[in-house]
Image: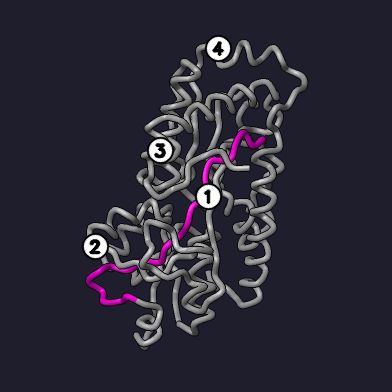
Amino acid sequence: MTWTFAGHRRLAIGLGVGVAMALTACGGNLGSEGPGGSDAAEFPGGDPVTILVGADPGGSTDLIARALAEGASADLGVPVVVENRPGANGALAAQELTGAAPDGHELMIFNGSLAYITPLAVSPAEAVDMADFEIITGVSQDDYVLVSAASSGLRTVQDLVDAGRQITYGTTGVGTGSELSQALLFHQAGIPAAAVPFDGGSPTLTAVLGGQVDVGSIQLGEAVEQIEAGALTPIVTFARERPSYLSDTPTAVEAGYDVPVQQSRSVAAPKGTPPAVLDRLRTAFRHAFGTDATSSSTPTTSSRPTR
């Protein structure tokens, strides 16, 4: 798709409003009481729990989901399995979740951009409404980094300006923070550029490494190993401050571009899930946050309950 400058402004405004809404929702149900109190004693009743991930295997969302599943399974005493439903920045997974029984046995990792960026980039019929879900807990807030293949010779934003041609940039999907961060940067820098969308961070990373696209905005947890190995060059981060893992890489703001973009995540259940079941799941996920699997799932991702 082609972004317009007006669209950039609407998306940037929506991003700020959406972050506030998403993080408020993450803590809004804590300690809730209500009908269905007996469900907590019965749940999960020996039946497995499924966590949907709206991206391909191997990316940050997938890795976080699998680490959370391992820790939650130990606390719940039943299998917690991850199923990937890539496509439309998680909208396909969200659509499936809205049709699931509100009994706590089908959940999803809800990427914040699906609620606060994607609705501003697609038709109303395609938009996902957070009001259709119960937020169990916040999970993480992650930074994006613009990377190129080390062999490309593209090391700075000025290199992209001086290329004198259209730059191709890989995104993790239409209406994602990955697309927004690059579209804003290239517009502000006056760089002619074309987006190439993929279904998640892992295929985007592969495309950058393979030279299918010039650059890509990828979450730091997905890119750090290839950066440390010297296969990827970090150009700028879209964090508000330099992440400790990339202390030598400037932020886009430091480079002169007003493009702070981050990704938030939460665990969501279908609307109408009993409060007692939500509380039981919340306890299980908070147990998972303290496990070794979660702390090592993505070394540069802040995986913790967010409010």
Is residue 120 shown above or below 296?
below
Residue at mark 1: 141
Question: Type of residue at label 4?
Answer: Gly
The mark lying in front, picked from 2 and 1, is 1
Q: What residue type is labelled 3?
A: Ser
> Are the residues at dot 2 and dot 3 in contact (C-beta closer than 8 Å)?
no
Q: Residues within 10 Å of mark 4 (few under 14, many from 20)?
A: few
Q: Which of marks 2 and 3 is in front?
A: 3
Marks 4 and 3 sit apart, C-alpha to C-alpha, by 28 Å
Q: Indicate left or right for 150 with 92 as reference.
A: left
> Going from the N terminus, do you reach mark 1 or mark 3 first?
1
Residue 117 place in picture, x, y as percent:
61, 59
Q: Which of marks 4 and 1 is nearer the N terminus?
A: 4
Q: Earlier in the sequence, mark 2 or mark 3?
A: 2
The 10 Å Cα crowd at callout 1, few under 14, some 14 to 19, many 20 or more, is many
Asked whether the beta carbons under mark 2 and mark 1 sit within 8 Å of each other, the answer is: no
| Image height of 211 relative to 88, above or below | below
In magenta, the rendered stretch is 134-155
Q: Residue 174: give x, y in percent of width and height.
A: 52, 60
Residue marked by disc 4? 45
Q: Which residue is drawn at 24% across and 62% down?
A: 231
How far apart marks 4 and 1 lie (CA) works out to: 32 Å
Q: Mark 2 points at which residue?
A: 231
Tag 3 residue: 295
